[in-house]
Amino acid sequence: MTSTADAPTRPLRRDAARNRRALLDAGREVFAARGLEATLDEIAHHAGVGVGTAYRHFANKQELAAAIFKDDFEQLVESARAALEVEDPWQALTGFIESTVAKQADDRGLHELMTAGAMNEQPMQVDGKLETIREALFEPVAALMERAKKSGCLRQDASPTDLAAILLMMGSTFTVSEAVSRPVWKRYLRLLLDGLRCTGCATLPEDALDVDELDLALAVVKKH
Amino acid sequence: MTSTADAPTRPLRRDAARNRRALLDAGREVFAARGLEATLDEIAHHAGVGVGTAYRHFANKQELAAAIFKDDFEQLVESARAALEVEDPWQALTGFIESTVAKQADDRGLHELMTAGAMNEQPMQVDGKLETIREALFEPVAALMERAKKSGCLRQDASPTDLAAILLMMGSTFTVSEAVSRPVWKRYLRLLLDGLRCTGCATLPEDALDVDELDLALAVVKKH
DNA sequence: AGTAACCGGAGTACTTCTCTCCGAATCCGG
DNA sequence: CCGGATTCGGAGAGAAGTACTCCGGTTACT
């Protein structure tokens, strides 16, 4: 029954608090640069503390990641809602997409978490946050797209799940961008967005993913 | 001075020849289904022979892969050249792209080999074949695109290296397609192609990769 | 000063993959 | 149909990497 609020843990000793902070900061940096496959050992050293310290503060990598990315998630949903306030429907949609993709281009860990399981073998469970965010995101994004369709600037056969696919595809361009030290991902995002734009092109082949399929796709785990 | 031609190796014993065949066939299947990270052990068992046998016929995975994919490579260059004969420039270009992508959708190993190093950590050297094929492919592809541009159906700011990027991006959609047992990659390829089409859209941001950058991008290897 | 809380990182306990080795089985010429 | 050369098969050595623990020593707080 200690329920929701954290138990009345006594305040951390000063060195402990300092180290916890350092670990969170280091985690953010390392995850951003190297992705989620970074080791807790690695993060600990980058934070200038021993491995033991890391494992005392966070039982494992997942817990650390959850602590680090919680904010980013909420921020994301927030910006989707905010986009609905933007005047021009096309601008609202593409603006949201661009800022989302930009954030992930700068943070490999965030990108891997958002597309978790789809590419990387071990999905890395960050408790329920992930499913939650996808659900929370779906509604405002669907509204954003609906509006753009009505105004005639988004192709009629586009679906919200297409955005998930686009995010997935952008992953490879991030790698390339890093290799050439130049944000080429912008070029390919634009290509994709130009494809989404309504231009009297024929309809797309293959139905878009439905929501169940998307879940499936984002949860590809090896079975032996 | 034994030079080019294979040394006059005596014909293999019948069981040896049979096993070699079985290994090549199994390799093709396993690589296609599981990608290049498949183990030689795995392929050996799938072929119904012991691991030792596999290593006697092929010093390592690379050598087996080279033997398997040599043909596919040549075939690819061939089809690029053939596309130049097609009447309609847009049809020629997209037809070539679609068939290339389709082939890779069905063969994860082939796709990984063509985009080697860009995503997977260990590039897996298949002697010089890889660089050779990229070079051999560049010329006909560039011609194909030039023709499409002149006829006004391909956006002016498209570059041959963009096709490499598109191939890279398609990788994620292959994974999704497998997960949902439906070739959704076709949908996203079309989206990309519609983006490439000339529609009076603004020019793309960021210059395309130049050839050196592409090489760099396709050779991202971890440095510690 | 005393003690509870905390630190550090060597070390354990996996897992995973590549490739070797050698007794046993198989082929094939005479 | 026999004997030696060739090939088979798969246990296991060795290398590489990761997740997490343990405990002597240190630090913060009263």
Image: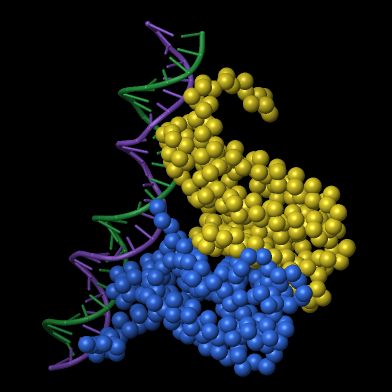
Chain colours: A yellow, B blue, C purple, D green
Picture coordinates of residue A216, whole percent (x, y): 65, 58
Task: Specify whether B211 is left or right of A97.
Answer: left
Does B46 sit above or below residue A115?
below
Say which of A210 and A73 sits in front: A73
Task: Specify whether A15 is left or right of B90.
Answer: left
Kindly identify the residue that appears in the image at 78 percent across and 54 percent down: A141
The quarter holding residue B223 reads bottom left
Report the number of discs. Answer: 0
Kindly identify the residue that appears in the image at 62 percent across and 52 percent down: A104
Say which of D3 and A66 sits in front: A66
Kindly identify the residue that appears in the image at 53 percent across and 26 percent down: A17
Picture coordinates of residue A176, whole percent (x, y): 54, 63
Picture coordinates of residue A142, whole percent (x, y): 80, 56
The quarter holding residue A207 reads bottom right
Does B144 sit above or below residue B208?
below
Picture coordinates of residue A182, whole percent (x, y): 57, 60
Task: Specify whether C29 is left or right of D25.
Answer: left
Kindly identify the residue that appears in the image at 54 percent across and 38 percent down: A25
* Image quarter (top left, top right, bottom left or bottom right) of the N terminus of chain A: top right
The answer to whether residue A55 is visible is: no
Say which of B36 and A114 sits in front: A114
Task: Specify whether A177 is left or right of B41.
Answer: right
The answer to whether residue B135 is visible is: yes
Does A21 sit above or below residue A114?
above
Does A13 sit above or below residue A81?
above
Say which of A67 and D14 sits in front: A67
